[in-house]
Image: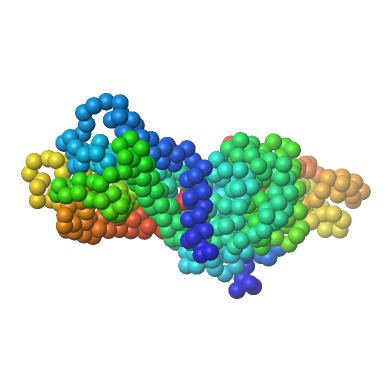
Amino acid sequence: MSDAPPVETRGLVKRYGDIVAVDRVDLTVEHGDVFGYLGPNGAGKTTSLRIMLGLIRPSAGSARLFGRDPLIHGAKALEGVAGFVEAPRFYPYLSGRRNLRLLADYDEPVSRIRIDEVLETVELRDRAKDRVGGYSHGMRQRLGIAAALLRAPRLLLLDEPTTGLDPAGMRDMRELVRRLAAEGITILLSSHLLNEVEELCNRVAIIRRGAIVYQGELHELLARAATSYRLQALEPERALSVLLAQPGIGEVRLDGAALRFSADENAVAALTLALGQAQIAFSALIPETATLEELFLGMTDGESSDHDRPVALAV
Amino acid sequence: MTAVARVYRWEIAKLLAQKRTYLGLGTAIVVPIIFVLVLVLRSGGPNDVPLGRYIRDTGLAVPFVVLFFMSIWGLPLITALVAGDIVASESHNGTLKTILTRSRERGQVFAGKTLATATYTLVLVFAMGLVGLVAGSIAWGFHPLTSLSGTKVPAGHGVVLLLASLGVYTLPLAGIAAFGIFLSTVTRNSAAAVVGALMWALLMQLLGVLPGTESIRPYLLGTQFDAWHGFLRTPADWAPVIRAIWLCALYIALPLTGAYLVFLRRDVAGE
């Protein structure tokens, strides 16, 4: 069972009446991944995480954590798994420490020292005696992480852990995630922040209106976003041979009268010289940039308007 | 400790950290004291209720009379106050997801909550009864009690009858608590569940006093609040007691089963 992937969903569907919140989602998170689950608000990230944690029942399909389905195995499916959906919530009338002691008692008994340890990890030890009702949003987020760490998880499910935090809080939270990942914890992290996922994750899935539109290595996704160019040369055939011989030029293809290729700026600058030396005239050399941002917006249907943006994408 | 026992312990701890628990418990304790104080300061008394005429004869009569008055809506209200909140407060605080993503099964969490509510209900009734006994005894002494059949019951035996009566009295109250838990689980709204459970109790009382309901009256929940009268007859009349036991078992089991099934299967989203 331990060889089973930390997260594996197959054909996951959640319907609310006519609304399909999660639409046939197949996710696989491998051991050691820091997996970014990326999508705009309302795309179905939280709903999928709720199904994984056994909080809601899928309309169809299955979600397995280390091979165990919460629908079948109940709370045992969460063995070695911890995390939170939406903002972590606690009993406001109990102190931070007492909340943790309560939650520890919902698992196997842990020592006071262990509770101090996790409080230390999230830098809440000074405020542990205060009621959670008086905590800031950022402190509750950190207490949420502390509560998750009490379970000594092998898999952490974190739903937008930096949402609502100030810049310093965001930086600290990301630092914490990085540290936990370095300790070997597999992490599934949902986010609508591209740079966050870029900074932390090795693999990503992009969800749009409940359906996965991309899943794979982050560097592959970044490669897609690498700048591509269109070259309008008078002698395309000759230009093609120059392109092919030129270092730093990739994915060259002849597209009618135009040549398309990908390259970084330096390679393109060098290319113009090479074309000049070869006496190949060209009428246009146009960058067709798709930043990761645009890639994301394209995949998620440009939820921030501007449909004319050139987005070269087929997934 | 078993899993349910641990959940139970924390449910009690949570109750002890919330104001409404003390509001309920405080009311249950203060009411008999005020009752005694008023009767000490004023003449006259509740002559038309069971044992009302003997209230100044012995402190033992006080808790029985208070039981009668509090059964109308007092105890149902302070029971519903906690029962209606026991699941809904988790929904309100958003903590249901927090505790349901640990190692405890939903059934264990539900069992812990039910036991904590039962404990609260039991404590309410016995605290009220015993405070009444003490306050009454301070005011009028600890003397033999005149039973409903007119015989004298020695004070010591009277205490035994009081404890038995409090026990039987807890049953219909637990029926209201069970209904409160059901509403708390289904509505996810504390206020709705508290008011709903109280309405249920009042409806049962109302049905009992309407004309034409004589045939169903022995089976109404409200009627079971009088089952303890059986203990205060000579010889003891077990019929109302036994009927209260099996009937209340139904009034408790049905809503609890419903609540349990809902709790086990329901989607926990945003709560």
Q: Residue at x 38, y 35 (%)?
A: B30
A251 left or right, relative to A135: right
Residue in view at x 59 percent, y 65 percent: A79
Foreground of the two, A227 or A252: A227
Tell me residue A6's x, y (percent): 62, 65
Residue A226 in view here: yes
The answer to which quarter of the image holds residue A129 is top right
**Residue at the extreme top:** B42
Determine the residue positioned at 41% across, 55% down: B115
Color scheme of the displayed model:
rainbow
Which residue occupies the extreme right position in the image?
A: A277
Count the marks: 0
Q: Residue at x 30, y 29 (%)?
A: B40
- Give the camera-side residue of A302 and A4: A4
**Residue A131 vs residue B5, the one in the foreground:** B5
The percent coordinates of residue B192 (x first, y second) are 35, 39
User: Can you give x and y, in whole percent of width and height, for residue B204 in the image?
Assistant: 21, 44
Quadrant hosting residue A142: top right
Q: Is residue B31 among the parts visible in the rendering? A: no
Q: Which residue lies furthest to the left in this view?
A: B212
Residue A187: percent from left, percent from top: 67, 57
Q: In this view, does B169 lie to the left or right of A114?
A: left
In screen coordinates, is B36 left or right of A41?
Answer: left
Viewer-nearest residue: B132 or A187: B132
